[in-house]
Image (cartoon, helix red, strand yellow):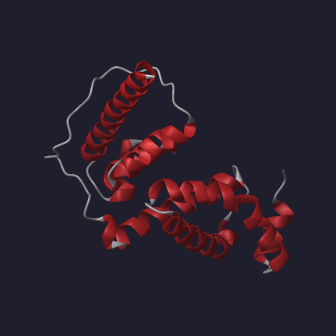
Amino acid sequence: MNYTELVKDCVRGKAKAQKQLYDMFAENMLGVCYRYTRSLTDAEDVLQDGFVKVFQNLHQYKFEGELGGWIRRIMVNTALNYLKRESRYHHDEIGEDSSYQIAAKDNPELHLSAKEIAQLIRKLPTGYRTIFNLHAVEGFTHVEIAKMLEINEGTSRSQYARARNLLIQWYNQTQSFKVSNYVGE
C-alpha cells in the first residue's frame, strides 16, 4: 500500500487521516508493546505514548522503507524508555551473578503454538525479555542493543544466551509435563 497521501494528510493535522493511520497499525503495534511490558494496561500506555511520538515526528518520515517498520522502531524505543522510567520493572533485572541455571545448548524442536511461545517469553525477567525481544524478534545486533540500553555488548550477549537457555529449560519442562499428563490418562 502507498502511504504517501495518508502520511501527508497526517502531517497536515487531518484527524481522519490520523485515525486511519492509527487504526491500520494499532493492533500490531500493541503486540510489539506487549512483548516488552508485564500487562496489557502497560502495553496500551506505551502504545498511546508511541503514537503521540509517531504523530509528532511523522514529518521526519522519508518514505524510505516500510512505514510500519518506522512506526515499529518508535514503539520499541518508547517501550524501552517506559521500562527505564517505571521502577516496578527494575526489581527483576538480572546481573551476571544470576542464580538461573543454564540449560542444554542444543536447539529443541519446538512443538508449541505461537501463543505458548509468547507465554514462555513473557515469563522471562524484564532484562532477559527485553534483550531477547530486541535480538530474536526485532533483529537488532548486540552492538545496537548495547547502545540502545546503554549497557556493555557482552552483557547483551550473556543475557540473551541466558534468556534463550531459560526458555529451552522451560520448554523442556513443558514437554515433560505434557508427556506425563498424556501417559497418566
Along the line of sight, the residue nearer the viewer: 181 or 33:
181
**Left or right of 135, for residue 75:** right
Q: Where is residue 127 in the image (x, y as percent from the top left)?
A: 32, 53
The answer to whether one can see residue 62 in this image is no
Along the line of sight, the residue nearer the viewer: 151 or 80:
80
Q: Where is residue 66 in the image (x, y as percent from the top left)?
A: 70, 50
Residue at 32% over, 69% down:
88
Along the line of sight, the residue nearer the viewer: 5 or 98:
98
Residue at 56% over, 62% down:
74
Q: Position of residue 67 (x, y in %)?
A: 70, 56
The relative height of residue 177 versus residue 23 in the rendered view (above or below) is above
Residue at 42% over, 68% down:
81
The answer to whether one can see residue 106 in this image is yes
**Left or right of 152, for residue 28:** right
Residue at 71% over, 59% down:
25
Q: Quadrant of the C terminus?
A: top left
